[in-house]
Image: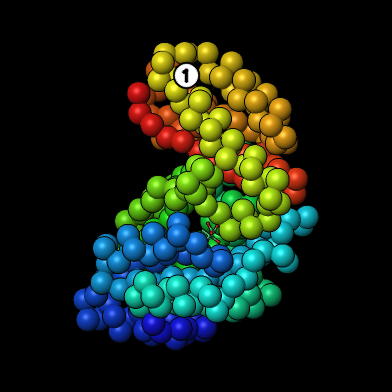
């Protein structure tokens, strides 16, 4: 596995690959890799000749009171895991390489960026869209692979790819879960033992809501209220629990066929997100 820190080295290696006619898949990450990330790498390998993984804890997608400073950084372990997966190139840029002090440009996908998680994390999706846009520009991938646990993030990136005409095939990969249903996430490391017992109830509440919809319950507001109440009773501080149309994340109507239920809730200081998507 080649490890590259500088933008110029990344560009010259990728352009040499492209000159040989090789295709490139990019897996952007913030590191602290778990089985969910390794699944993305695995799928990327099936889709392109060369796989580039980036590890960059992106400061612009963290709010002032969020966990940027404490975000788990496990570079050495991550490198071993990626080498084992036969990753071709690991891009590990520094913050100053990525964000020059005179940078004036950001990317915002309007509308999608200030709802749901965006309403609770102002500026987050602009930070995500900007870094992903930059990584696309640097790595020039033919394929980009992201996890669907961050469903809203995926929709933001999908919309940016469409609006900016990036010639990139976007692939969304199903969430990896612990045996108790908890979605794998680097932030699960923050949970106390007691919180770990409660955390799977977030996914259970999504499954419950899905079952109610599949049974024909049509009052989505009632399902949402019921889920919020159950989560609060279990000890969560809820941000939102919302039934949407998975095509554009608008609130679902009885006519919608493609549904995603998005949820975010805190356990103590740890903010968890999860979702479930299905067709009617
Ligand atoms: O999902 C993540 O890990 C990050 O939001 C991403 C896409 C790597 C951008 O920093």
Place of residue 84 in the rendered image (x, y in percent of width and height, measured from the top left): 38, 75
Q: Residue at x 60, y 25 (%)?
A: 227
In which quadrant of the rendered view does residue 72 lie?
A: bottom right
> Helix, strand or loop at disc 1?
helix
Up the image or down, 207 lies above or below 226; here it is: below
Q: Is residue 237 left or right of residue 263?
A: right
Q: Residue at x 41, y 84 (%)?
A: 2
Q: Is residue 270 left or right of residue 246?
A: right
In which quadrant of the rendered view does residue 237 lie?
A: top right
Furthest-right residue in this view: 65
Q: Which residue is mark 1?
A: 212
Place of residue 189 in the rendered image (x, y in percent of width and height, measured from the top left): 64, 58
Furthest-left residue in this view: 21
Up the image or down, 181 lies above or below 95; here it is: above
Q: Is residue 164 left or right of residue 204?
A: left
Quarter containing the N terminus = bottom left
Q: Residue at x 55, y 79 (%)?
A: 76
Place of residue 255 in the rendered image (x, y in percent of width and height, measured from the top left): 40, 18
Residue 32 visible at all: yes
Q: Residues within 10 Å of mark 1 (few under 14, many from 20)?
A: some
Q: Residue at x 70, y 36 (%)?
A: 236
Q: Is residue 147 left or right of residue 49?
A: right
């Amino acid at each position: 596995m080649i490890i590259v820190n500088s933008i110029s080295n990344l560009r010259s290696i990728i352009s040499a690959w492209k000159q040989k006619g090789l295709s490139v898949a990019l897996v952007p990450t913030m590191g602290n890799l778990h089985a969910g990330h390794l699944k993305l790498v695995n799928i990327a390998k099936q889709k392109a000749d060369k796989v580039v993984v980036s590890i960059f804890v992106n400061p612009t997608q963290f709010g002032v009171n969020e966990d940027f400073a404490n975000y788990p950084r496990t570079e050495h372990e991550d490198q071993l895991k990626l080498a084992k997966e036969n990753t071709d190139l690991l891009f590990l840029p520094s913050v100053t390489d990525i964000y020059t002090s005179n940078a004036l440009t950001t990317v915002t996908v309007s509308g999608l960026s200030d709802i749901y998680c965006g309403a609770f994390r102002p500026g987050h999706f602009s930070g995500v869209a900007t870094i992903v846009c930059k990584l696309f520009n640097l790595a020039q991938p033919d394929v980009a692979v992201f996890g669907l646990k961050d469903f809203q993030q995926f929709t933001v990136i999908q919309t940016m790819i469409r609006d900016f005409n990036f010639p990139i095939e976007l692939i969304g990969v199903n969430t990896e879960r612990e045996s108790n249903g908890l979605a794998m996430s680097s932030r699960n490391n923050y949970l106390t033992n007691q919180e770990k017992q409660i955390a799977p109830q977030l996914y259970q509440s999504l499954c419950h809501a899905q079952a109610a919809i599949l049974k024909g319950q049509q009052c989505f507001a009632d399902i949402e209220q019921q889920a919020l109440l159950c989560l609060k009773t279990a000890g969560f501080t809820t941000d939102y629990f919302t039934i949407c149309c998975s095509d554009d994340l608008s609130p679902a109507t009885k006519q919608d066929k493609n549904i995603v239920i998005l949820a975010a809730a805190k356990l103590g200081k740890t903010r968890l997100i999860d979702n479930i998507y299905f067709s009617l």
